[in-house]
Image (cartoon, rainbow, N blue to C red):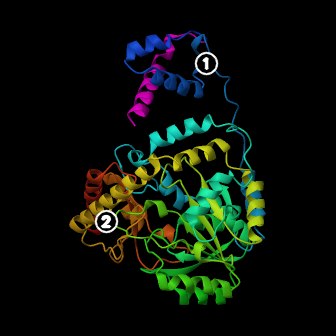
Amino acid sequence: MQERSSVSDLAKKLRRELDRYSPGGKLPSSRVLVDRFRVSPVTVSRALAQLAAEGLVVTRPGAGAFRARPRPSAAPAGDTSWQEVTLSAEGAADLVPRSVDASGVLVSLAAPPPGVVEFNGGYLHPSLQPERAMAAALSRAGRRPGAWGRPPMEGLPELREWFARSVGGAITAAEVLVTAGGQSALTTALRALAPPGAPVLVESPTYPGMLAIARAAGLRPVPVPVDADGVRPALLADAFRATGARVFVCQPLFQNPTGAVLAPGRRGEVLRIAREAGAFVVEDDFVRRLVHEDAGPLPAPLAADDPDGVVVHVCSLTKATSPSFRVSALVARGPVLERLRAIQIVDTFFVPRPLQEAALELVGSPAWPRHLRAVSAELRARREAMTSALRLHLPEVSLPHIPSGGYHLWPRLPEGTDEAALTSAALRAGVAITPGRPYFSAEPPAAHLRLSFAAVAGTGEIAEGVRRLRTACTEVWG
């Protein structure tokens, strides 16, 4: 983080000084800049690269950096208003509008303004990411023979084997496709399993990104309520009968956002109900590697107990590493695997080989289990810090379930709370939160918040964020 800040500061200083040089004029050498600003050569190199990307500087190997010549004036803006008519007419005949609402996803992807506590993040804080291990893995991967060549379309055999072992059961490498992140894998699965206009059963509440995928594909999400033990089998059976759906998407382990784990007695029921309906279960096993230190043994993925090919399994390395380490897997049995493979190839060809090689280097290194143990302990400490702070400063909210895995809590707000007003007030108070409404595909039964404890710097920032949230709640509740 310090290096990034130094690069940004130096780029800002150099940007202010560019007027001293005529177009085409040579800037001071890197050595002079290092001495003058007391920064490292790497910082100088990155700052100049940033200015070059902005079109302000031109770098010439062996010659140095030069002020760029002015760009030609921009052409007048065109009139794109015709697109409103075309895009509206295009979807007029669709059974389900294929519009894309990314707002529920952007809440957890967008970085808040400086100084704002990030309770809305969906990834590990940089201090929790295995940055050194990833850098070392990427460096070693780049030197592997053939690392920059075209990989097999399904993924590297060794990486497919690693994912197969991590799922367990009788899953083999031949039943694994390497994909570019969990979101991409879910998109491929839904496109493969349901035609436009079809219903797709989803947990309620559920991950907004999955709802966005379904709606963008022209599918109709149908909610099935979740309780503390996961999806309710009787309601799942009712939903299959009422809709004729052929797909059910679920997160059996540390469900997002409730944190629920599918109870042992319900696991077989869910598979039986889906099998009798002739339907697939898409299992999004997104945070298995973010288990907390006090969780105890985890249940196996549903896919490990499924000999009949009911489950299409999605798992990823991204949540446990970095948002940019987008390596995941689709696991399936039977003819559906070929359909999944065909759609993935058409959409993305393959996951870049250097990234696959880096994933192999990372998960095969001694640093990987050390990283998982450290994250496990830290997430438990953060969960306990946030739980304690909420009980101390916000006794009005209820916490019906405290998960032992994942990276967030799902507090229920007092009756009548305006989520939008509270979200705005919280941002004014200096804390970014995620409202609960986008997690429901139909009308929500109550107001909620999703509060992440993984994207902040530590337990001290958690305590401060909850204090700021108290200020916002006082403003909204009166």
Question: Would you say 180 lies left or right of 468 here?
Answer: right
**Residue 98 shows in this picture:** no
Which picture quadrant has residue 16?
top left
Q: Is residue 56 above or below residue 323?
A: above
* Residue situated in front as seen by the camera: 222 or 160: 160
Q: Is residue 466 above or below residue 448?
A: above
Question: Would you say 165 lies left or right of 258 here?
Answer: right
Quarter containing the N terminus: top left
Q: Assess disc 2: are there few (<14), some (14-19) or many (≥20) residues with their C-alpha within 10 Å of its C-alpha.
A: some
* Type of amino acid at the residue the image marks with label 2: Val
Q: Is residue 305 above or below residue 385?
A: below
Front: mark 1 or 2: 1
Which picture quadrant has residue 355?
top right
Question: Which disc, if any, is residue 58?
Answer: 1
Q: Assess disc 1: are there few (<14), some (14-19) or many (≥20) residues with their C-alpha within 10 Å of its C-alpha.
A: many
Quarter containing the C terminus: bottom left
Percent x, y of residue 17:
46, 16
Q: Secondary structure at mark 1?
A: strand
Question: Any magenta on residue 351?
Answer: no
Residue at the spot 60% in from the left edge and 64% down from the top edge: 314
Q: Main secondary structure of the magenta part?
A: helix
What is the magenta range? 1-23
Percent x, y of residue 320:
47, 54
Disc 2 marks which residue? 476
